[in-house]
Image (tube, coloured by chain):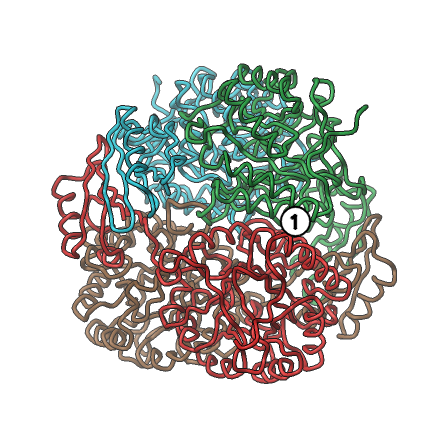
Chain colours: A green, B cyan, C brown, D red
Amino acid sequence: MVVVMSPDATPEQIEAVVSRVRTTGGEAFVSRGVQRTIIGLVGDVDHFRALNLRSLPGVADVIAISTPYKLVSLDHQPVRSTVVVGTGTGARPVMIGPDTFTLIAGPCAVESLEQTLEAAEMAKAAGATMLRGGAFKPRAAPRDFQGLGKVGLHILAEVREVTGLPVVTEVIDPGDVDLVTGYADMLQVGARNMQNTALLQAVGRAGKPVLLKRGIQATVDEWLMAAEYVAQRGNLDIVLCERGIRTFETATATTLDIAAVPVVQRLSHLPVIVDPSHSAGRRDLVLPLSRAAIAVGADGILVDVHPDPEAALCDGPQSLAGADVRELASTLRRLIPASGRRLGDPSPVGL
Amino acid sequence: MVVVMSPDATPEQIEAVVSRVRTTGGEAFVSRGVQRTIIGLVGDVDHFRALNLRSLPGVADVIAISTPYKLVSLDHQPVRSTVVVGTGTGARPVMIGPDTFTLIAGPCAVESLEQTLEAAEMAKAAGATMLRGGAFKPRAAPRDFQGLGKVGLHILAEVREVTGLPVVTEVIDPGDVDLVTGYADMLQVGARNMQNTALLQAVGRAGKPVLLKRGIQATVDEWLMAAEYVAQRGNLDIVLCERGIRTFETATATTLDIAAVPVVQRLSHLPVIVDPSHSAGRRDLVLPLSRAAIAVGADGILVDVHPDPEAALCDGPQSLAGADVRELASTLRRLIPASGRRLGDPSPVGL
Amino acid sequence: MVVVMSPDATPEQIEAVVSRVRTTGGEAFVSRGVQRTIIGLVGDVDHFRALNLRSLPGVADVIAISTPYKLVSLDHQPVRSTVVVGTGTGARPVMIGPDTFTLIAGPCAVESLEQTLEAAEMAKAAGATMLRGGAFKPRAAPRDFQGLGKVGLHILAEVREVTGLPVVTEVIDPGDVDLVTGYADMLQVGARNMQNTALLQAVGRAGKPVLLKRGIQATVDEWLMAAEYVAQRGNLDIVLCERGIRTFETATATTLDIAAVPVVQRLSHLPVIVDPSHSAGRRDLVLPLSRAAIAVGADGILVDVHPDPEAALCDGPQSLAGADVRELASTLRRLIPASGRRLGDPSPVGL
Amino acid sequence: MVVVMSPDATPEQIEAVVSRVRTTGGEAFVSRGVQRTIIGLVGDVDHFRALNLRSLPGVADVIAISTPYKLVSLDHQPVRSTVVVGTGTGARPVMIGPDTFTLIAGPCAVESLEQTLEAAEMAKAAGATMLRGGAFKPRAAPRDFQGLGKVGLHILAEVREVTGLPVVTEVIDPGDVDLVTGYADMLQVGARNMQNTALLQAVGRAGKPVLLKRGIQATVDEWLMAAEYVAQRGNLDIVLCERGIRTFETATATTLDIAAVPVVQRLSHLPVIVDPSHSAGRRDLVLPLSRAAIAVGADGILVDVHPDPEAALCDGPQSLAGADVRELASTLRRLIPASGRRLGDPSPVGL
């Protein structure tokens, strides 16, 4: 950390900062300039944060140099992680990580067994090795369809049995974590709940891999801090998902921050995937954004597919169907090898 | 709603939209232009939303004309509401609404009985008629102070007994709503949880007034939809709190959207207050922003005060103390009457 | 400035930074931490910026502590400035500064002599001491009305002669600065041109006061750097105008950053006013935002008025007329004294 | 266009809208709903915009359905354009369009003949067929290096003679357009000047192809309107360049809006390229973002290279050099064919 003093800070005020830092066993190096004095801090950052130095008289600013996340950082673990999803439920386990490119696909919302099964078959045909599908749907508008709840979880488990695809589904209430954990292979924390600390802590204790979407208002640093909340409960099986941030542009639902993928990869060892469906909210952009995700180096994509988008109860306008799914399949087959990865990822026998 | 067809939409596609609308009992008016056809829909908007018209072939866009919230809208209740806080707990009840200007003040976090009591006395001296204080603190950084929890709730209740000030405090886990309801006079839903629908529904059922902060990424419409989630559970005692939105500007923690106050007042009957402390994150801006809040027509402000900001465990840099509190008091006394309201608001005897 | 080294920076890389800094006569203080080394720089910031330290091997980040503007900063001139507008053109000069609150009003665009004169009389009745009006209109849409140009300037001068109000009008082409200077009392640089350095330099040399609007994408620091471009040409008669920044919120045209007023006042000695008309783009918000501007401590407001908003060729939806103008007048008379200033400001005789 | 009336609009107010529309020869279709009436307009949109309907009593909102640009729209010209750069100056002409992928590279700023020549050779080695280099540099900070001006233009012309690469360079003052046109093969309008209408009109008349960068605050619609300003002067040889928009994220200089590429391609026939260097402002992201640009379907990229980034006078931290340039070259050779295009594009003899 660096403490920047005001131009009119007194020597006593500078000394007070130094003393307070030393109470924590830290060290403070003072650089006296013509206009300002700055103080470099060396020691335990968590201790420094608790010192509340910005409130001391004469302090103009406190600048954080190191990041407030540790377990998920590349400093902590310099080798990129692979997260295994789908063990112990009869599914065919999937590895998400630096060597593969994983397609996770399925309906935005589980509406019926038939619709989910059909979507899962479409997903599989396109190369998907995991199924997505929402049983609990957090919606901005209170009268929109909110999901089938427990019935939806049953359906997902049935479809897994038929298709062998591990299932990722969203949980929105900490009180439902146990329930959802009983059905799903991976727990999704949605963008709206990225800073819902009660939920982050609950999924951190659940013993299943977690898919953590970036909040539409969240900086990369805040996203990694949210992941740290999960990791602190002993769960490092976290996959990050970039799904667009809120900006002034209205041509798309949100602005896909494609640069966030390499930015995260320089800060954290966790896998990071991209959601081209929800970021744009437009079916016609799913394919170009999927190609961009592959090329930029993402570890996978999360795509909405639906057998009948016109009848979808949720996010129909962004769901792929028919010819689009076939084009996605051929795109993946062509581009992924050019990017030095292999598609899909049925993990080796014996896992 | 208005459905905008693509320039190349066929007559059959236009007819398909009209037919689908009519299945809901709605009416569709077609305007055929040189370049495009648009279709105006008349009927139940919730039905139209469920139709998923944007997914139909030939549809370029669907534009919502009416809002997806009802109970909290000015159309539903054309007279501005007054919310009474503090009945049944021995506190002196407070009315928040169009006739008064309410100062709610207190420490960002409850740290000890002594600190909270001292802050409450400061708040009272400045003209506050309600106490704020956090027992559960949602923090971006997982190693920052997360609040005293239940102990903090006890302290708040004790301080209420001594000072007579009703208490507002944040709840972050739906599972804690019953606990917090047992102590607080008003339940706060924080900015990070504005779209935590499980929490919104839980506080909606709790039988206490709710203080709903705007999410830093939320449009005014989304904020009112969040309020509608609460209202749908039978609770219309909601006070909205503008606390800044996230923009590119870094001179302040967030950008206070002062225009949101009159914007909300033209859409909803709910009271709306301003949080000058968290929006700027800078002590030196609390007074100017408090003045702006009064002048723009807000129903109150929510201000952090702390007896010793340098020692605060949370948000010390933005807490008022000493001379600043006295200046706040004199500002309120001068400006509020010039704005045609009265300060504070011990409600009439007999409430 | 502070140079933050990478965790894996070598001693040689650290030494290279120190050496390069010393070539400029600056001093470098090294703080070696467990994880990182940081280097505090003391000396001439402009020299340091030219060193391009961020490109040196082992450098993770370079953090600016001081600001890259000087002439407009409060450090350079610790007393707040007053800008006098309207000398030498037969107008009644106006002082914009810390003691007064100046209402500048007029039509968004000059359409005819009659319309401009009528608007000027409305403005005057509301308490305005300066007239605004656009002869050159930069418009986003190329087929929208672009202003009367030179004819508009003639009209403004005529209206000044009749009303005595000094005139501020926008200039958008450096090649037109001489022309506009021949007519106007104050040159406006619009939000779209805030970073048009050729224009900033041209108005800096023109010998007339400048009204510099904040770009809708500009940080406060960038805005002050734009003012510095003007000041560097020898012109410190600059008035800043906050007119809203672009955010995700769509209820208003832009989001008025009301906090920018006190933020600027803590960084710069220049007067700062607010444009409630263009920031919101809604007539019904002009009055509440004007009140907020007064209360927050702005030195004035810039308001669109039009005798017949329905017939306006530009920005009719935000122009005040009739009863609204009368309400503005009474608001100003009530609130300005309560804020410790005096309205309008015909400067003392003899100026 | 669609006019939305207020819930309390009177029949007379509705009729007034209809009458006014008919004065322009347009047609108005009224849809009367339970809560609101909406009016669909059919006719000349430019006429409707001039009607100022939003100012009429009873009008709640006016929604534009069609776009205010025409010449640059895909409706106007349904086949995607190819822009030829470099005829008549002795350079080897280049075609930018749907069949090729063009690498434009060079130093951010022209500093000397030697540096520019060296950078041009690096660019060529990486596969570039065009040279970029700034002679006039618009900088946020007034004391930063502002370019060599005319001397820089001379250098660029000399380097073109040696290398055969056509030259694109920025012009920032309408008064310099003739000068720059005398040297350059393509005129760049920078992000800061995207809404500088005087400049747009000047380059529109200059008779050279134009590279139009998107403003960091500009929506796609505003960007296309800026292109329309150029096109209206008779110049349709416009290449659009996405270079990042301003958001709250601070890990990158701006947020590359990768989705803007396919969005533009669905609205306009103009070629669109990507600037991975300025959007991120970080050298380590240039390669991943270049890959994303290829995959998403851009028509080219604009990349900063510098023989000695540590000594660069401008934007050194984002310039590629040495091994990075070689990696860019091999990336292009591998990915572009996989995207169905061919690299570089010396146009066929005889052009």
Q: Is C12 left or right of B328, judged from the image as shown?
A: right
**What is the secondary structure assignment of the residue under circle 1?**
helix
Which image quarter: residue C88? bottom left
Q: Amino acid at mark 1?
A: Val
The image position of residue B126, as x and y in percent, is 48, 37
Q: Chain of mark 1?
A: A
The image position of residue C193, as x and y in percent, is 44, 67
Q: Please determine whether, in this image, residue C195 is positioned above or below residue B4.
A: below
The answer to which of C244 and C295 lies nearer the viewer is C244
The image position of residue C138, as x and y in percent, is 36, 66
Residue lying at 37% horizontally and 51% vertically, measured from the top left: C253
Is residue A175 something one can see in this rendering?
Answer: no
Is residue D197 something one can see in this rendering?
Answer: yes
Q: Is D158 left or right of B64, judged from the image as shown?
A: right
User: Which residue appears farthest toward the right when viewing the image?
Assistant: C11
The answer to which of C242 and C94 lies nearer the viewer is C242
Q: Please determine whether, in this image, residue D123 is positioned above or below residue A138.
A: below
Residue lying at 44% horizontally and 74% vertically, measured from the top left: D203
Q: Please name the residue that numbered disc 1 is placed on.
A: A296
Residue lying at 62% horizontally and 70% vertically, measured from the top left: D129
Q: Is A60 left or right of A285, judged from the image as shown?
A: right
Mark 1, other Cα within 10 Å: few <14 / some 14–19 / many ≥20: many
Q: Please determine whether, in this image, residue D59 is positioned above or below residue A96.
A: below
The answer to which of C351 and C192 lies nearer the viewer is C192
